[in-house]
């Protein structure tokens, strides 16, 4: 068996993650034929197939699944060598991969990136927007250095640092402006529009209204806060959004904003990273920059 290369392992990992040659090639910034050649050479070196190739999709073989687990560990160890070198410097230099959940990314990222770049001009910030479970998994696999999410995550292997608290507000049709603000018990009887399954913000809204997530409800789900607000503007119901989203999401919809009586629904936003990360000290410094950015904004 010929020596395997790190380049081949990274191409394999991208293909295993995306399940599609075109998307994997794009993620690796190479052509699809070049990726195919590298994967085929890797399989020839191993003497067995790593993928089952279908007309529209590919999937890992049984051996490929086991191989993928080992490859993730190898690549994580290699990345940590680079992180160890970065950690030896006073300031971060090089790539910093940060995950952000969708109910934060559109509203805070521009300012956060601006301030992080100003504080560390030598870092290359790469952003990954996804749901919390996916970000946590990619942190564990070494694909991300840190993530900004709603706390708690409660993963023993991760450090959690609180950044700020944020209230939720009620979004209702503009015709309802001035009406008494419903309490959480009243919301249970209204047509409450929420994000689709998988979003932590959905679970937080359901918790405030004391609605079981498994309880059947007549409702429409959306994949973004923008869609929820537009649905409210169309008279389809009411929804909750975080305060940071008000300015962006309500500027083009005929809706009104109301603040709840105490206790107000809220969430804690924080930053997480692996406890074993060599960049732990630098990531804590990064979290302080993010905290100052968000406190100045709020």
Image: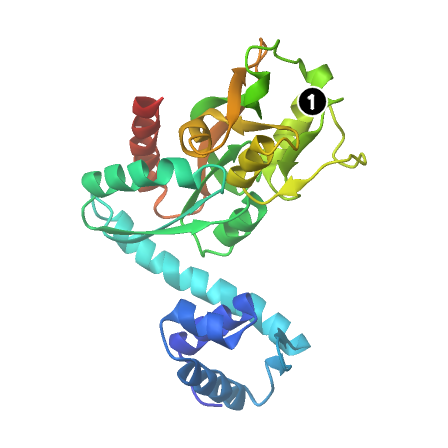
* Depth check, front residue: 46 or 182: 182
Q: Position of residue 192 (x, y in %)?
A: 68, 29
Q: Can residue 135 be spotted in the picture?
A: yes
Name the residue rendered at 50%, 26% in the picture. 268
* Depth check, front residue: 270 or 213: 213
Q: Can residue 162 be spotted in the picture?
A: no
Q: Position of residue 221 (x, y in %)?
A: 66, 41
Name the residue rendered at 69%, 22% in the picture. 209
Name the residue rendered at 49%, 83% in the picture. 39
Q: Residue furthest right?
A: 216
Query: Badge 1 local density, few (<14 within 10 Å), some, or many (20+)?
Result: some
* Depth check, front residue: 275 or 247: 247
How many numbered discs sit on the rendered protein? 1
Q: Quadrant of the C terminus?
A: top left
Colour approach in the figure:
rainbow
Q: Secondary structure at mark 1?
A: loop
Give the quarter of the image for residue 34: bottom left
Give the quarter of the image for residue 91: top left
Residue receiving disc 1 = 209
Q: Position of residue 119 (x, y in %)?
A: 20, 38
Against 93, residue 9 (above or below) is below
* Depth check, front residue: 106 or 161: 106
Position of 46 with respect to 100 (left or right) is right
Against 38, residue 181 (above or below) is above
Against 162, residue 69 (above or below) is below
Q: Position of residue 220 (x, y in %)?
A: 69, 40
Name the residue rendered at 59%, 17% in the picture. 176
């Amino acid at each position: 068996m010929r020596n395997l290369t790190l380049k081949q392992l990274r191409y394999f990992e991208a293909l295993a993650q995306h399940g599609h040659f075109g998307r994997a090639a794009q993620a690796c910034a190479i052509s699809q034929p070049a990726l195919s050649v590298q994967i085929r050479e890797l399989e020839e070196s191993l003497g067995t197939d790593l993928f089952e190739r279908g007309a529209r999709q590919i999937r890992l073989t049984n051996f490929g699944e086991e191989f993928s687990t080992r490859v993730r560990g190898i690549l994580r160890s290699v990345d940590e060598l680079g992180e160890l070198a970065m950690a030896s410097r006073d300031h971060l230099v090089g790539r910093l991969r940060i995950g952000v959940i969708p109910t934060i990314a559109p509203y805070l990222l521009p300012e956060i990136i601006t301030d992080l770049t100003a504080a560390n001009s030598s870092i290359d910030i790469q952003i990954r927007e996804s749901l919390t479970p996916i970000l946590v998994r990619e942190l564990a696999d070494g694909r991300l250095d840190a993530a900004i999410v709603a706390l708690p995550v409660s993963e023993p292997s991760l450090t959690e640092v609180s950044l700020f608290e944020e209230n939720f507000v009620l979004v209702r049709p503009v015709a309802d402006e001035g009406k008494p603000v419903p309490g959480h018990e009243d919301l249970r009887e209204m047509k409450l529009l929420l994000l689709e399954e998988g979003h932590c913000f959905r679970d937080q809204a359901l918790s405030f209204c004391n609605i079981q997530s498994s309880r059947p409800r007549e409702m429409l789900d959306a994949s973004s806060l923008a869609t929820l607000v537009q649905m409210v503007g169309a008279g389809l119901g009411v929804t909750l959004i975080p305060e940071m989203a008000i300015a962006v999401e309500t500027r083009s919809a005929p809706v009104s904003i109301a603040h709840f009586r105490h206790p107000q629904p809220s969430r804690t936003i924080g930053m997480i990273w692996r406890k074993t990360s060599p960049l732990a000290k630098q990531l804590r410094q990064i979290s302080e920059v993010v905290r100052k950015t968000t406190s100045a904004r709020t």
